[in-house]
Image: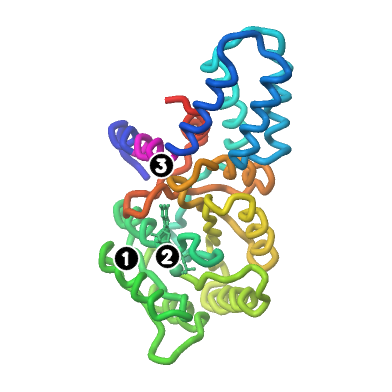
Amino acid sequence: MSGGSEEKTGLLSSLRKGLKLTSSRMGRGISDIFSGNDINQASLDELEDLLITSDIGVETASDIVLRLSKEKLGKAATAEEIKKHLAKNIKEILDPVAKSLEIDREAKPHVILVVGVNGTGKTTTIGKLAHQFKDSGLSVMLAAGDTFRAAAVEQLQVWAERTNVTLVKAKENELDSASVAFNALSKAQNENIDVLLIDTAGRLQNKTHLMDELKKVQRVIGKIDSSAPHTRILVLDATTGQNAHNQVEAFLEVVDIDALVITKLDGTAKGGVLVALAERFGIPVVSVGVGEGVDDLRPFDSEYFSRTLMGLD
Ligand SMILES: Nc1nc2c(ncn2[C@@H]2O[C@H](COP(=O)(O)OP(=O)(O)OP(=O)(O)O)[C@@H](O)[C@H]2O)c(=O)[nH]1
Ligand SMILES: [Mg+2]
């Protein structure tokens, strides 16, 4: 969150490592297409294909290539120059969504509801966020709102212990995640906690009753604090590619999504999906996940991300 330039360098190099698959595929691809000759239509078409296969999205890809064509068609350019040109255009798309997660310190607690389909990385992201908040001096509490699986509570418990924060979980046989959220918020208020992170069960976006339950969680929290939840984060798994678009649409029908976290960028060569999501939905991207470890959640820096995406250092 804060820190000197040394810390920033560390953050960036781990983002680069996380984006290695996408970055090297794109970098190699562009170098193969553009080798210093005059730029012709065939090379632009090849570039468009390369961008599309990185999940950047058809419209965005053709948009980016059109801009390049206007400036450089018929002229000579090195791969390096092309990469810089593309990175600049992608940065412009990403700038409006590159926001950091702001915590309202007056809220006591600032309530963060974390939603997403099965296995996208919700629980892991909560653990990583808890670690970051603690590091920046905030007191944190976790709520195990995933009451469907016993293992889900245990997993969050491990993160609570690792980050040394309190976990509120359901009483025996209590299966209602809304009541867990309610109890956690009351407890957090009594204890003057800064941030409450609420985990939820992974749900299929096409199951009405599961999505309805999310509405209930929100409603119940709102009874204690009408401004809560203060931030609703949708966690998306970058490896699911275009399906991420459907997930955003489905969740937007039941929750106002304030922020996205895109996880598992380390596991895909298609990190371009983030660009497509930014252009299509304009929802702030507050962090990206680049691994399973506690430090593998990175702030989203549009300039660095776009340069890395295009295979630049
Ligand atoms: N490589 C990598 N793995 C990740 C990342 N984030 C989460 N994972 C892994 O993805 C798997 C699923 O993560 P969870 O945090 O359990 O996902 P979830 O959304 O809580 O899953 P459900 O509760 O089942 O819906 C775990 O094995 C995590 O370690 C990431 O950024 N990179
Ligand atoms: Mg989970």
User: Would you say residue 251 is visible in this rendering?
Assistant: yes
Some atom of ligand 1 lies within 8 Å of the CB belonging to the residue at label 3: yes
Residue 169 drawn in magenta:
no
Q: Nearer the viewer, residue 171 or 238?
A: 238
* Circle nearer the N terminus (1, 2): 2
Q: Secondary structure at mark 3?
A: helix
Some atom of ligand 2 lies within 8 Å of the CB belonging to the residue at label 2: yes
Q: Quadrant of the C terminus?
A: top left
Q: CA distance from mark 1 to mark 2?
A: 8 Å
40 vs 182: above or below: above
Residue 159's tag is 1
Q: Nearer the viewer, residue 191 or 252?
A: 252
Q: Quadrant of the N terminus?
A: top left
> What residue did someone put label 3 on?
18
Q: CA distance from mark 3 to mark 2?
A: 19 Å
Name the kind of residue labelled 3 in the image.
Answer: Gly
- List x then y, in percent, for residue 33: 59, 20
- List x then y, in percent, for residue 142: 38, 70
Quarter of the rendering containing residue 57? top right
Q: Which residues are magenta?
A: 11-19
Q: Nearer the viewer, mark 1 or mark 3?
A: 3
Left or right of residue 9, residue 185 in this image: right
User: Would you say residue 190 is visible in this rendering?
Assistant: no
Category of crowding for the residue at label 3, using alpha-carbon neighbours closer than 10 angstroms: few (below 14), some (14–19), many (at least 20): many
> What residue did someone put label 2 on?
123
Q: Nearer the viewer, residue 182 or 128?
A: 128
269 vs 225: above or below: above
Label 3–label 2 contact, CB within 8 A:
no
What's the residue at 58%, 25% (across, down)? Answer: 88
- State ligand 2's quadrant: bottom left
What's the residue at 32%, 57% (across, down)? Answer: 131
